[in-house]
């Protein structure tokens, strides 16, 4: 692994919070750090979120450094991390040793042994039953305007009309894009003689052949979305299928929820779902399996990627996030379930723009706060300012005043340090995003014993949940609120101008994009945790 020259340390490293302790908390100031010019290697890309911004000039979280220097001779306690998501492949070889098992339940006896209302909940609970797809929340509101007030209904209806117009135009564009990608990808694979490639690989192509030049331009544009080609094709296919559903009106005709048999507008109706935390189709557990892997896949076991917390955590799975928008009821019950079963950190890589029963979720967040549980939540992938635009769930009903201090909202970083360090899809907000973390090209577990690169604030959130779990493992006396503020206050601070808001966005000062203006750093966070714990 090629490292930046040691002379750069004198430009970028400062010591702070020295106090009376012999442990000094390393606080990074990287505004004078030269932008990395070398191409990121395949080895670096596979685990870039664990690297160090000083030694590698890659905006990772210094996880490797923390293990090597701070945790080498220490033993932590197990921390249960709740993963509220689409389901987790708990049979994946790189996760199987990190799966939570309910000590109060006897497997397969058909009895609710722990009397919590959920029969045989051995590894968690599935609030979706056999559902994989769902309506978006604005579609549910358009179908039933009694779900919310008149102003919100009008907003949802306006969005529906806008989506209908976009679908009309987008169908042709998506079909053309699919064809262009397939053709260009085939040309580039042949030229590079490999199936997986990066923007840097494209830049290295010197051929003047017209077809290759055109294909290179197409794929550079496609890779700018922050996804590998194979995943981009999947997302475009989903977008096309979604456009067709909108145009055909199928989403308004279908009641996906009917098969569960519950009343989604009655929070007391809890007898639904099942104990299959993978879900009815392993492939549909892609998102949740990847999220779980970021936190808990094995470190240095010579397979796949490395988890942030690995041997220090147990993954408790709550399946509540479908392909579509989650129900507020499911999320509220999922949070409470994870809390009641011992989770000290909960990851929520989901979100939406409408929340008819938001108070149920707010109350669940407050319940978690009373039980000293930290909730780590993804900021969202709409490249918008969520100080202005709605984004649920959150911890502030007016976008100004927090009603709880146990929820931390995470924006996503790109692996390219410099003006493109913020992922072009990431939401931001000086008040409603707390801190940023790696979220582009993150390598982790996927169903059926596989691994893939995925991108999103969905990936940034579990990176932070992993660091939070490390803190709670080695310094268990620290509260959820203390851990939240350690994550925010110990991070790497940036003041430089960066691109935000997607391809048509603008440049803003990084320090204005979140409450902390920082990037999560595991090394500094663990040092600060040690200091706060008097160690």
Image (cartoon, grey):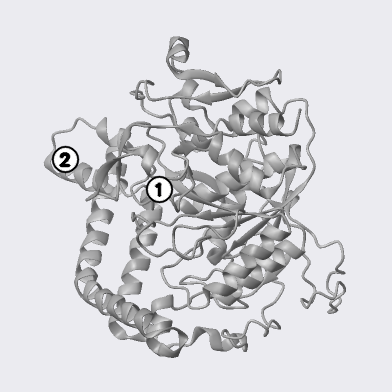
The quarter of the picture where residue 7 lies is top left
Q: Nearer the viewer, residue 508 or 252?
A: 508
Q: Secondary structure at mark 1?
A: loop
Q: Where's the C terminus, which quadrant?
A: top right
Q: Residue at x 45, y 72 (%)?
A: 324
- Please identify the residue farthest to the top as the structure is shown: 7
Q: Is residue 222 left or right of residue 79?
A: left
For disc 1, the marked residue is: 430
Q: Which residue is mark 2?
A: 213
Q: Position of residue 187 (x, y in %)?
A: 25, 46
The answer to whether one can see residue 401 in this image is yes
Q: Is residue 195 above or below residue 384?
A: above
- Counting other residues with Cα less than 10 Å from the Cα at mark 2, is it few (<14), some (14-19), or many (20 or more)? some
In the drawing, what numbered circle is on residue 306? none
Q: Which residue is at 37% across, 61% downward? A: 235
State whether residue 101 is above or below residue 45.
below
The percent coordinates of residue 309 (x first, y second) are: 67, 41
Side of 230 relative to 111 (left or right): left
Among the 4 quarters of the image, the one containing residue 90: bottom right
């Amino acid at each position: 692994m090629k490292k930046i020259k040691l002379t750069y340390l004198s430009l970028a490293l400062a010591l702070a919070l020295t106090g009376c302790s012999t442990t000094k908390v390393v606080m990074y100031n990287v505004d004078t750090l030269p932008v990395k010019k070398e191409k990121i290697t395949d080895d670096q890309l596979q685990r870039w979120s664990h690297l160090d911004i000083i030694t590698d000039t890659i905006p990772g979280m210094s996880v490797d450094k923390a293990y090597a220097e701070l945790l080498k001779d220490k033993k932590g306690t197990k921390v249960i991390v709740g993963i509220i998501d689409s389901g987790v492949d708990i049979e994946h070889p790189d996760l199987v040793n990190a799966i939570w098992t309910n000590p109060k339940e006897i497997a397969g006896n058909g009895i609710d042994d722990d009397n919590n209302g959920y029969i045989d909940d051995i590894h968690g609970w599935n609030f979706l039953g056999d559902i994989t797809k769902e309506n978006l929340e604005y579609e549910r509101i358009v179908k039933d305007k009694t779900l919310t007030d008149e102003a919100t209904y009008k907003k949802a209806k306006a969005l529906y009309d806008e989506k209908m117009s976009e679908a009309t135009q987008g169908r042709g564009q998506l079909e053309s894009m699919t064809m262009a990608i397939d053709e260009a990808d085939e040309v580039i694979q042949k030229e590079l003689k490999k199936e997986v490639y990066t923007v840097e690989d494209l830049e290295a192509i010197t051929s003047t052949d017209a077809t290759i030049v055109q294909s290179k331009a197409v794929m550079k544009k496609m890779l700018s979305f922050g996804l590998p080609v194979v995943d981009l094709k999947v997302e475009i296919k989903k977008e096309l299928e979604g456009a067709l559903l909108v145009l055909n009106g199928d989403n308004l005709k279908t009641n996906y929820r009917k098969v569960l048999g519950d009343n989604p507008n009655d929070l007391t109706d809890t007898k639904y779902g099942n104990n299959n935390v993978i879900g009815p189709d392993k492939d549909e557990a892609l998102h949740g399996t990847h999220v779980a892997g970021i936190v808990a896949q094995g470190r240095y076991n010579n397979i796949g990627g490395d988890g942030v917390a690995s041997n220090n955590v147990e993954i408790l799975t709550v399946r509540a996030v479908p392909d579509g928008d989650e129900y507020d009821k499911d999320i509220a019950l999922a949070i409470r379930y994870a809390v009641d079963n011992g989770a000290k950190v909960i990851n929520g890589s989901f979100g939406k723009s409408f929340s008819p029963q938001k108070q149920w979720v707010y109350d669940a967040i407050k319940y978690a706060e009373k039980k000293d549980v930290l909730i780590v939540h993804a900021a969202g992938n709409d490249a918008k300012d969520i100080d202005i635009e709605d984004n649920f769930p959150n911890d502030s009903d007016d976008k100004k005043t927090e009603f709880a201090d146990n929820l931390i909202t995470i924006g996503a970083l790109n692996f390219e340090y410099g003006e493109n360090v913020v992922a072009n899809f990431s939401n931001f907000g000086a008040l409603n995003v707390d801190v940023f973390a790696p979220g582009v090209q993150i390598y982790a577990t996927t169903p059926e014993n596989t691994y893939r690169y995925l991108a999103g604030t969905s990936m940034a959130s579990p990176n932070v949940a992993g660091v939070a779990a490390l803190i709670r493992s080695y310094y268990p006396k620290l509260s959820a609120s203390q851990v939240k503020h350690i994550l925010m206050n110990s991070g790497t601070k940036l003041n430089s101008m960066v691109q935000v808001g997607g391809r048509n966005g603008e440049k803003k000062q990084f320090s204005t994009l979140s409450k902390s203006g920082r990037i999560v750093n595991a090394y500094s966070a663990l040092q600060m945790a040690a200091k706060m714990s008097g160690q």
